[in-house]
Image (cartoon, rainbow, N blue to C red):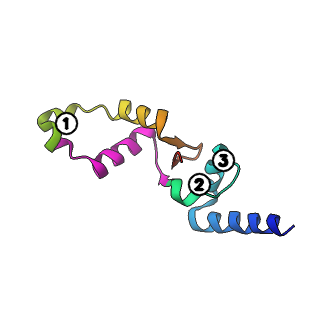
Amino acid sequence: MEDDFDSILEYSDMCYKHGSDAVYDYMEFHDELDNFEEAYYGEWDSEEDFARHIVEEYYNLDKMMGSLANYFDYGAFGRELYNWDYTMGANGNVFRRI
């Protein structure tokens, strides 16, 4: 009984902090919320938008590729990210696979 109460409390806390849509999306892929905060990367409009964020955050394409950076395929990069490292729920919330 106490475990049920703790689970409900954890669920409620995560919904308050991150929104119920984010928690719902996470629960599509997991049975527990244990790694939610470590895995959560926010809400994005599309896989490509998230890929653009990752590239801007971690890479300097202009330095690496020069003028060829204009031709970088964010859609293909996004598909690759979601094949291996990330998942996106029905509401657009992104989670790193742990």
User: Which mark is drawn over residue 22?
Assistant: 2
Residue 43 included in the magenta stretch of the image: yes
Residue 12 sits above or below residue 65 on the image: below
Tell me residue 39's x, y (percent). 52, 53
Cα–Cα span, label 2 and label 3: 12 Å
Residue wearing tag 3: 30
Residue range (magenta) = 41-62
Viewer-proximal residue, 10 or 19?
10
User: Which mark is drawn over residue 69?
Assistant: 1
Place residue 11 in its image quadrant: bottom right
**From the image, which quarter does the N terminus lie in?**
bottom right
Tell me residue 98's x, y (percent). 54, 48
Callout 1 crowding tier (Cα within 10 Å): few <14, some 14–19, many ≥20: few
Is residue 54 shown left or right of residue 91?
left
SS label for mark 1: helix
Circle nearer the N terminus (3, 1):
3
Callout 3 crowding tier (Cα within 10 Å): few <14, some 14–19, many ≥20: few
